[in-house]
Amino acid sequence: MPLIIDEKEITKAPIVDDFVQSFPQFKESSDELLKQNVNVIGPEQLVYIGQRELAGTSPCDDVISILGSEDATTCHIMVLRHTGSGAAAMVHFDGSSVAEGLKTMVSIVEDLTEDKNAGKLEVLLVGGFLDERKNSHEVSNKVLKALCESPHRLHLITACITHFNTEYRNSVPFPIIYGVAYDVKSGKLLRATFPNKGPDMGLRGARHCTGGKENLNVYNPQTRRLEIGPFHYDQLPNVDLFLTFPESHMRKFLSTSPEQEPESFYESIRAALIQLRDFPNPLQTVFQGGKAKIYTKEKNSGSWQLQLV
């Protein structure tokens, strides 16, 4: 099926350089998003989606109403929503398994939609910048290709990506938007940052350092539970050496865009490296009995509480 832009069918996937020339209207919609103030989102009603993760829910969910993700430099954050049911899913793509991730998102949204014909599937896309290595270009191209080759009719509404999400500081390119929140009940996309991202971020970060390429679903909207794993990650050679590195070396050797990483990068990558060092076999030492770690959200504080099996 083709990608739909302003009711026109796009049957051949464009590369992002051609895309921004062919569809300048996305600069106008991007500018509106870029003008927003950055919202500080607390943990209440939030499910946070890390790199190579996805999650979805519907307006009927009485626990989660905000899907959020940040720390995207070359990565892209996508929201897929059904205009009739309001069901939505979010993913944080780094270029791995994009088509498969999109397929999972569609499945989540359709499972939460009673009448699929009473509305359409819309896509909101944010992320990337004009980085010198052109990693963002690669991710944009993979996402556009997946959208065009999907068997579903997908309507692209927002594309604040790469060229449209770049500012220059002393002639050095930086992404303008690092994170967004999607309010499932109102249907609004917001610039956002998340001081409290939830549990097991070191564990979750370790997976995309050396683990599988798939984008894992971390939330079950039927049970209202956060579900982490189970998954395996490979051991990282010289992990002890990496842990002795100062922040500048961490950025240089462990980032696709060292200068542009947010302040939280150093602590996040250290947490992932410590996880890799201390728990080299997570299927044996982290996921007891090969089962996921299950959390439920405490409504007053918004914190996730581990459920002991």
Image: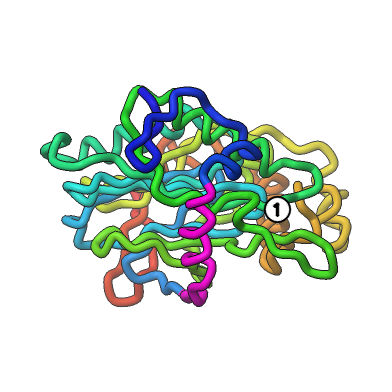
**Label 1 sits on what residue type?**
Ile
Pick the front one: 292 or 171:
171
Magenta segment boundaries in residue numbering: 24-40
Answer few, some or many: residues within 10 Å of disc 1's Cα (few below 14, many 20 plus, some between 14 and 19).
some
**Spot occupied by residue 71 in the image (x, y as percentages of width and height):** 60, 58
- Residue 239 lies, in percent from the top left, at 80, 45
Q: Does residue 27 show up magenta in the picture?
A: yes
Q: Which of 163 and 225 is in front in this view?
A: 163
Q: State the image coordinates of residue 213 (x, y, percent, origin top left).
A: 58, 31
Q: Name the image quarter holding residue 97.
A: top right
Please give the name of the residue rendered at 79% of the width and 69% of the height, measured from the top-left corner: 169
Q: Is residue 143 among what the camera can see? A: yes
- Seen at 49% across and 49% down, the residue is 159
For mark 1, give the secondary structure.
helix
- Say if 77 sits above or below 211 in the image: below
Whole-percent x, y for residue 143 in the image: 53, 35
What residue is at 47 percent from the left and 75 percent from the top? 39
Is residue 217 rendered magenta in the image? Answer: no
Could you say which is closer to the camera, residue 71 or residue 218?
71
Which residue bears the numbered disc 1? 274
Q: Residue at x 29, y 40 (%)?
A: 121
Residue 286 in view here: no
Residue 266 as seen in the image, left or right of residue 155: right
